[in-house]
Amino acid sequence: MSRINMNSFDPISVIDKITQRIECIDTWEYRGSKYLFLGTSEGHLLIYDVVEKNVQGKITSSVMLKDTKPISKKTPITQMNVFDDFNILVILTDSEIRVFNLINFSVIAILQKTKGCNTYAYSYKAGEYLHLVAAVKKKLVLYSWDGSDFLEIKEYNIPDIAKNIDFRDNAITVCFKKAYNIINIQDGSAINVEADKLSFTIFVQEREFLIVKQNMAFFINTEGSPNRRHSMTWLETPSAMAIHYPFAISIEPKQVEIQIIPDPKDPKTISQSLFLLGCKSITVKKDIYVSSPTSVWRLAPMPLMEVVDEMVSNLEYETAINLLSNTQENVPGIKEKLIKIKTKAAYHLFSKEQYESAMNYFESAQVDPLKIISLYPGLLPPNLQQKLSVPFQVKDTDKNSQALKELEKYLVGCRKNKMTYTPPELSNSDYDLPTLVDTTLLKVYIKGNPQLIPHLFKVKNYCHIEESQRVLLEEKKLNELVLLYKSKELHREALTLLAKTKTPKDTISYLCQLGKQNMAIILEHSKWVLQKCPEDALTIFTTERKEDALPPAQIIPHLKHFAQPLLRQYLEYIINDPLNPDKTPEFHNDLVFEYLNAILELIKPDKCVVKRVPGETIAGTEPGLLGVLRKKLINFLETSKYYLPEKMLSRFPFDDLYEERAILLSRIGRHESALAIYAHKLKNFQMAEEYCDRNYNKDSEDAKDVYLSLMNVYLKTDGVEPLIDPALRLLNKHYRSINTPKALNLLPTNIPIDELYPFLEAVIRDNTKTKRDNQIIKNLFKSEHIKIKEELIHLRSGVIKITDDLNCAVCGKKFLGTQAFAAQPNGTAVHYVCFKQDKYQQDRFQSQQQQQQQQQQNGYYD
């Protein structure tokens, strides 16, 4: 077990060999004066004045006996405590507790229920509260200070006579021979824990205390459970311990060794015995006095820097750092001193292979990362390693897993901090600090955590390209090298490597992740995969990207040249996109031609397995791919609004694909030509009629006579017998949409009149009904007109009498003399001026409303 000697005090003898035996000691400070109290075995309280002098910047102190107070005639003063905030002294003697006023040294109280008390403890927070608990036989009596006296609060029964008690905050610990209790004074609950060979208990901080068993001690919380993994051991069994107001001690969870000298006589050994292993901070809050049975010494702190230098020379770096970090002294250069010691401590711990602690100190001292990396030979480029010197012999740290793990944590921490400075050793090199850190971290990952390499490359990194490329190739980390190239936007290098070492799918996947700013690279490296596996390669151009989509104007010529069979699929993709369909006429034309070329190839005589007669089978119902393509083509020709039909007709055959040709003729307004195809080529009168149904528009000059055009197709055919029956059926069914005189002129003169009877009857009946409906409407309007005229005569016949007490309905004023007035339809009279003004406002309001309505209709308002 290691051991730290806290020889940071200089013992000064203040009282030497008094005749009475000293039992307890405390100090009091009042109005600038200091006093030392000694309680003796003879029952006397010795009061000393403390005299301090400043001699050449060094404080010296001496004591002078001021008074002797006989407190007891028979028994010693076994316990004594001064409470400066209240200027009171609490003494345990004659097995009872007495309270004294320190101003006039009068007895404030003798706590009657403490008769038979063998020990007491207190819980004290300056300026807030003071509680005191006394152990009296098998009871605990709890008191609280009210500012002038101790008031009894409560009693607690305990199972045995207490060996020792301690009190902190709201918890009391009571130590017996073979058990201890934890009592909560707030709710009165008690926890009993059996434990053999107990010495004493003592609080080390709120809610945590020590259970001392011979030379062992354990940290326990106020719930009775172990609080830390490690115990404490002593060289000898202690009889007591005081963690008192002169010190604020916090102990880290490490094994602690405390040397106890039961009967100290040599003052030098007294100061040397005050040490802790793993002590986090020790702060001196007031003067410290130590007593033997006959002597008293004052422990004067040595100069801080002398103490620190001695610790450093003894390699006690941790204690020196803690002392400097927590001192209250204002010492010049303390910050720089602390950094130097931390740096020395870091190098020392690193040489002892305590890598985690070393890295913590390196980071705290903000040591140059370049110097830390130099402790790992092989991780720095040789030209940089030669510029640095290591203060000790390094032992294969670049192969030590624990050392690499701590370097990895350190470098990850460096990446989170903005590193703006450049070490002088990196000048005139192609490295800066971020580049050095990231490149080194990559090497660490390669040696210890290769699975983390992709994570480094998926975020912004500063890896040195050539050096990183070298180490990745040496370790055959080709996937990781591709990620490096990608992170640096070296896409050509990445794709070249993929083409040599991976499958086409890897290249396709990479290209799918590039945006339109890399269009030239996409076109260049997609050539070979389009030829190798075209169906998969098409996804390069159809995958949705976070950035803007790839431009079709560059892709279409590329596909025409390198993958013509894929062009139709790509055109369908961009034109049928549900969110952003492409409306470029040129691309719509290309898709029509792609369908057409594929269909023409399929209907070649040498390609058809079964003999085919054009027009015999309804388009799109043919078996196999031909039916699928014709159906797609017809649907596209009917729905697309962007292709140019006038450029299509010359490409379509005259002796086949009649339905498609009819759609194109319809698009350019050549209805008769389109209808001739349905009537004579396809001989499908239903399709011809459906065509008229789709295109008829009574308000359009081009489409209002579409049914008449169909009749003309039926009846006016060169060298072919007229289609009388279809013409008559069309006439009888759609007579309302056909101009009757023009239709009669088209009919042959030899048609029997009885065959026209249904048509003529329907027309006459329809016209008669229309005439009667118009007469009814005319009479209704006439009746309405007469009614309104009668109402007007009635309104004009009314009489309005103007008197002196009549008020104007608009302004409310009376009519005076011969003022002009206007009579309103509701029988009221208003001044003529008011009438004109009111009428102007109403007309203006109506005009504004009409104007707004007009603007809404024109689209000026939402």
Image: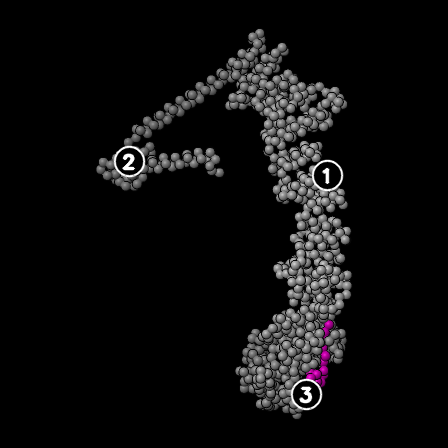
| First along the sequence among labels 3 and 1 | 3
Secondary element at image label 1? helix
Question: Label 2 near label 3: C-beta < 8 Å?
Answer: no
Counting residues from the N terminus, which is met first, the one under dot 1 or under dot 2? 1
Residue 1 occupies quadrant: bottom right
**Residue 305 or 236: which is nearer the viewer?**
305
Relative depth, front residue between 754 and 297: 297
Q: Give the range drawn in magenta.
A: 255-270
- State the residue position of label 2: 832
Label disc, if present, on residue 293 of the rendered structure: 3
Q: How crowded is mark 2: few (under 14 residues within 10 Å), some or many (20 or more)?
A: some
Dividing the picture into quadrants, the one containing residue 74 is bottom right
733, 556: nearer the viewer: 556
Tell me the kind of residue under disc 2. Answer: Tyr
Q: Which residue is under mark 1? A: 528
The secondary element bearing badge 3 is classed as loop
How many residues crowd around disc 3 within 10 Å: few (fewer than 14), some, or many (20 or more)? Answer: some
